[in-house]
Image (cartoon, rainbow, N blue to C red):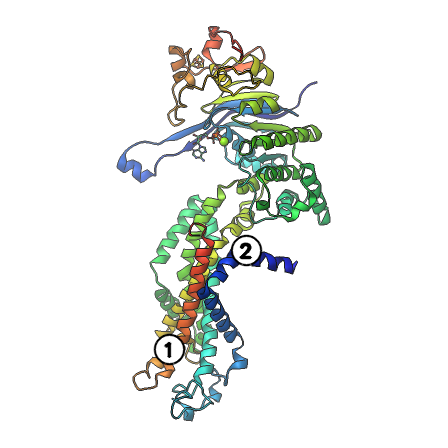
Amino acid sequence: MAQETVLQVDNLKRYFDVSKPWLSRVLEGGGRQVVQAVDGVSFEISKGETFSLVGESGCGKSTVARLIVGLYPPTDGSIVFEGVSLSNPAERARHPEKQARMQMIFQDPYASLNPRWRVGDIIAEPIRFRKLLEGGAVKARVGELLEQVGLSARDAEKYPHEFSGGQRQRISIARALAGRPDFLVCDEPTSALDVSVQAQILNLMKELQASLNLTYLFISHNLAVVSHVSTKVGVMYLGRLVEWAETRTLFNRPKHPYTRMLLDAIPDLDMSGRARTPVAGEVPSPINPPSGCTFHTRCPFATERCRAEVPQALSVDGQNVACHAVEEGRLPEWRGLAA
Amino acid sequence: MVAQRLNAILDSDLWWSFTRSKVVVGAAIVTLLLFVAALIAPWISLQDPWDPGALQLINSRNPPVWIEGGTWEFPLGTDNQGRDMYSAILYGLRVSLVVGFLAVIFAMVLGILLGLASGYLGGMTDTVIMRVADVQLTFPAILIALLIGGIVRGVMTPADFEAVAVYVLVLSIGLSQWVQFARTVRGQTLVEKNKEYVQAARVIGLPARLIMLRHVLPNVMGPVLVIATINLAVAILTEATLSFLGVGVPATRPSLGTLIQIGNGFLFSGEWWIVIFPGITMAILVLAVNLLGDWLRDALNPKLR
Ligand SMILES: Nc1ncnc2c1ncn2[C@@H]1O[C@H](COP(=O)(O)OP(=O)(O)OP(=O)(O)O)[C@@H](O)[C@H]1O
Ligand code: SF4
Ligand SMILES: [Mg+2]
């Protein structure tokens, strides 16, 4: 089956200027400071897939999510969604019908719902704004959405503070679905929830994906969650995608040294009781990232070339890796998690 | 539905903190009484103090009823034109409250709109609005009143000017107060706009105008109400000051401030009641509104609770 591409991101960049104000720069010295939050990320997502982005805090996952849904304009690069380029605010403004096909679910269930609005009005907002339905039909649809996410139609009358974190996340999902999107960006949708509730929300998202044929971009720093929900996984480090592949491939034979380090550190997927290797070293600042391969400060296989030259991604056995050691064939075989 | 609303109010923290303080309940009752008195002034006053035909000079400078020479016809005495002080105070209260409310509403609407735009849109819009605010702060209400009053007086006949004097006051006092609203709203907006519910609204595709009015505004109204209450007291006082200085409402339709100004001239000739009664009314009104404002500020500020 030829798969239809939903989202195509090419060489996406977003820099944030965090310099001090001009006057204090002149008085106290010091130049411009730029955070390279996302620095040349490319990937594709096909219809019905779940593409996950993983990486340590601050590597730019949320920024990628926000660029895709248009909360930030990209500094450079292109975003093509369902065949239409949405690479800058002007293009986005020209295609509201495409913007309507994507929605986002946020991390903090306490901040993502307006505390002064009734749940019914929160969920109905996309419907009313786009005039998808009118009058009583809106109310009926809101009730249907609430039931679809496992709440009751009567909950429409309540305010967000009357719900738990997990229930609020269900309300967020209902709002996201209200405009009948095809593509959902989920930025750590479960990381603020209790473990037991996390599983329920993830299962709900999986069910909805199957019944509504949704495509997900899923962001998490929890590899156990990622292995559970994803079709493909991309590993980010300091604003770059260092490796991406089918979930099974990535977990069974990770190639990039950073991916291996992350896998070594995950708390037991299968409760085998093996010794964990904690992630070594600190993430360098994205303000002055290391030269060449930004991972060289922590990589056991780093060479002179790694310090000088940015590794380009190459495709090896259907798996994309940006690493000189892989290219040069000097990386030892992965001995697996059980080692 | 109404019963439900009422229950929600009676259950709320605000109501609880309200009933806990006798002073606040007292202030609320006094404020309410004064508002009602101003509202129904034509029905509870003894004469129409704005009708020159009803005033008789023969009745001028009558003392209050409990003093030798006083009559029940003028319980609080009369002024130099034979105006019944009790009726004049009721009507004066009306003028003072109308000017105060209109000025605060004008300042509030202007401040909210500019503060929202400044905080939400940022960039040049923010810079321009905040610089204008800085400049505005260097002009006190009195100066603005003199300025606007001067211009309007220049282009209008004195009779016409009397008719619009109230609006000149409202405009001047309002202009001197909008900055405080704008700065508070801007600060709150900066906090709210980074919250995820605002970003969710952006992803839905809502234009900035709707996000500001529907999402941000309801969440910044708490502090705005506090400022509005406290500024009502300030506006009433400013109006009195301006009227006292003779740039306020005309003496034919005196506010409390105008009455105090008129009475001031008779303080040393023995007719103290012309200034004292309007003065006391003004003091009680401002004090009660201020107490309410202070309470509201503390009650709505979770950090102080
Ligand atoms: N609006 C902004 N202004 C300045 N810097 C920003 C901004 N947003 C993000 N950054 C910086 O960009 C980098 C990437 O941030 P981002 O939020 O995308 O990381 P993340 O991978 O989502 O991390 P986390 O797991 O903590 O959510 C960080 O160094 C962050 O400080
Ligand atoms: S390019 Fe070099 S430093 Fe970077 S991950 Fe590969 S081996 Fe390590
Ligand atoms: Mg994040």
Q: Is residue A82 visible?
A: no
Residue depth check, mark 1 versus mark 2: number of the one nearer the observer: 2
Name above or below for residue A42 compared with residue B47: above
Q: Is residue A143 left or right of residue A19?
A: right
**Picture quarter with the N terminus of chain A:** top right
Q: Indicate which disc residue B109 carries.
A: none
Name above or below for residue A252 compared with residue A168: above
Residue under numbered circle 1? B260
Task: Give amino acid for label 1.
Answer: Ile
Q: Is residue B196 left or right of residue B148?
A: right
The residue nearer to you, when weighing B35 against B139, is B35
Numbered disc 2: what chain? B
**Quarter location, residue B92:** bottom left
Residue A216 place in picture, x, y as percent: 61, 28
Using a 10 Å C-alpha cutoff, classify the residue at mark 1 as few (fewer than 14 neighbours), some (14 to 19) or many (20 or more).
many
Residue at 58% x, 28% y is A217
Residue B275 place in picture, x, y as percent: 36, 80
Q: Do labels 1 and 2 touch, CB within 8 Å? A: no
Numbered disc 1: what chain? B
Q: Indicate which disc residue B12 carries.
A: 2
Q: Is residue B235 left or right of residue A233?
A: left
**Quarter location, residue A271:** top right
Residue at 60% x, 60% y is B6
Task: Give amino acid for label 2.
Answer: Ser
SS for tag 1? helix
Q: How many badges with numbers are in the image?
A: 2
Residue A87 place in picture, x, y as percent: 54, 31
Using a 10 Å C-alpha cutoff, classify the residue at mark 2 as few (fewer than 14 neighbours), some (14 to 19) or many (20 or more).
few
Q: Is residue B207 visible?
A: yes
The residue nearer to you, when weighing B173 against B96, is B96
